[in-house]
Image (tube, grey):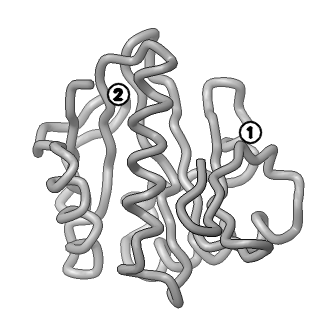
Amino acid sequence: MERGQMEIVVDDLSGPRIAGFLTEHLEEMRSLSPPESVHALDLDDLRRPEVTFWSVLDGPTLVGCGALMRIDAEHAEIKSMRTTAARKRGGVASLLLDHILTEARRMGLTRLSLETGSAEHFRPARRLYEKYGFEYCGPFGDYRLDPHSVYMTRLL
């Protein structure tokens, strides 16, 4: 999928560029939340067969990423949504979320859920998900109530 020069590609997570990008993501999440409240997946977890991972490229530059992790045959969780600091609020996340919703429908999923932070830092993410029809819900899957987490879901 392309918009201008941006392209979304399935990524096998083998390159050093995406490894570094995801390491930064984990470090940032750990700086914002206590360890028990950080639910970001590392490279090994993102390589599991139930996960599809996409990178967003603007020409040769990595500008964002996101993943879907199947919970069951009809339900998946959005994971690892991230945009580079230089491109925040520049349409990367919307482009990727559109793509993930389309791919989820193509995969036969009927529900998508996600966990994000409750802190002020995560407000733009929560607004984006609200704009795309996600509603607040209780914990799903293996999650438990956590004051540092917010859970959202939507039907497809």
Drawn side of residue 6 relative to residue 86, left or right = right
Give the quadrant of the C terminus.
top left
Which of the 4 quarters of the picture holds residue 145?
top left
Q: Residue at x 11, y 43 (%)?
A: 135
Say which label, 1 or 2, has the lower sequence index: 1
Foreground residue among 110 and 58 = 58
| Residue type, numbered disc 2 | Gly
Which of the 4 quarters of the picture holds residue 71?
top left
Is disc 2 surrounded by few (<14), some (14 to 19) or many (20+) residues within 10 Å?
few
Where is residue 116? Give x, y as percent: 31, 57
Is disc 1 surrounded by few (<14), some (14 to 19) or many (20+) residues within 10 Å?
some
Give the CA separation, mark 1 to mark 2.
19 Å
| Residue type, numbered disc 1 | Arg
Q: Which residue is drawn at 24% across and 54% down?
A: 129
Foreground residue among 106 and 111 = 106
Q: Which residue is drawn at 52% across and 33% down?
A: 69
- Mark 1 lies on a secondary structure that is loop
Residue that numbered label 2 is attached to: 141
Foreground residue among 64 and 43 = 64
- Mark 2 lies on a secondary structure that is loop
Residue that numbered label 1 is attached to: 47
Q: Which residue is drawn at 50% across and 30% down?
A: 103
